[in-house]
Image (cartoon, rainbow, N blue to C red):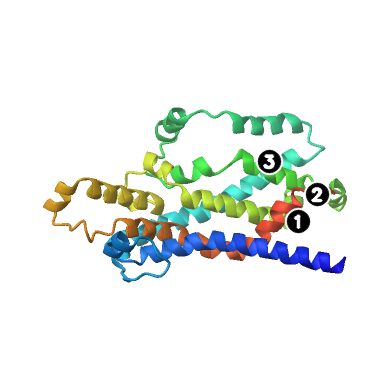
Amino acid sequence: MTKTLELSKVLINLLFIILSVMVVLPFLLVIAVSLTDEKALSRDGYQFIPKSFSLEAYRYLLDAPDVMIQAYGVTITVTVIGSLVGLLLTAMTAYVISRPDYRYNRMTTFYVFFTMLFSGGLVPSYILMTQYLHLKDSLLALILPVLLSPFNIMVMKGFMSKIPLEIIESAKMDGAREFRIFFRIILPLSTPALATLGLLISFSYWNDWFNAMLYIDDPGKVPLQLLLVRTLNSIEFLTTNTEFATQLGIDLASFPNNSARMAIAVLAGGPMLIIFPFFQRFFVKGLTVGSLKG
């Protein structure tokens, strides 16, 4: 019996090691390709160990470092402010509809759930943001559309509904009001769910480029993702219009086409990959605890 358990543990560990390697290897390949000379890529294909090391792709992307730094600043500002405010509003909304003593619990929950199925559409959203709220070329135009997600609210509600109502009632008997109960009791108990949803919300803000394409025309307020999308479009334009590139004196044989694409992926996703391990234990706990009863 003991040998069977040990063998099963070894097999499970081996399975997870294989899965981890399968997840990590593509990232390593992306980094390796971004550091490979374009001629070597055309000749030898993608390889984990570059035969011809080159930083030409990063030199091309960072040719104007001030623009890249400014884009990083915009993205970081939007991500930090949007994640904090969005997480607070998500927790407050979820706390209200998770309370069993709230009279309109089911009605409000259905209202939140209904927005997961139907939305106003792109045109009404654009008219609202530009003509009524006058948020064109404003960082608020990047924050508000992603601020609240009904899916995140429902996940947080599922977690907070597991908190015993007796804790809230005992706090009321001690003279605590709703805001004090929420900030001093509910939020500390919801730390795993807050960390999980905070990470998901920050990913949404960090990877968002579509709202910036709609509402941002000011070059000084362009976020990182939109800047990289425009750079990628420029690369595709040059590689598909050889005559135009030749007139500009660009040697397409050495132009960092494939390596620049991988470098864009590294610049776009690298910071979040560094941050994620610090929140991993909260992320896993938040996903598992919210799914259990009791």
Does residue 155 appear anywhere in the picture? yes
Callout 2: SS: loop
User: Which residue is under mark 3?
Assistant: 154
Q: Residues within 10 Å of mark 3 (few under 14, many from 20)?
A: some
Q: Which mark is residue 163?
A: 2
Q: Amino acid at mark 3?
A: Met
Q: Which labelled disc corresponds to residue 189?
A: 1
Judge left or right: residue 27 versus residue 231.
Answer: right
- Nearer-the-camera pick, 18 or 287: 18
Q: Quadrant of residue 68?
A: bottom left
What is the number of callouts on the image?
3
The residue located at (31%, 52%) in the rendering is 231
SS state under label 1: helix
Q: Earlier in the sequence, mark 1 or mark 2?
A: 2
Residue at the (40%, 36%) spot, across then down: 134
Q: Is residue 204 left or right of residue 8?
A: left
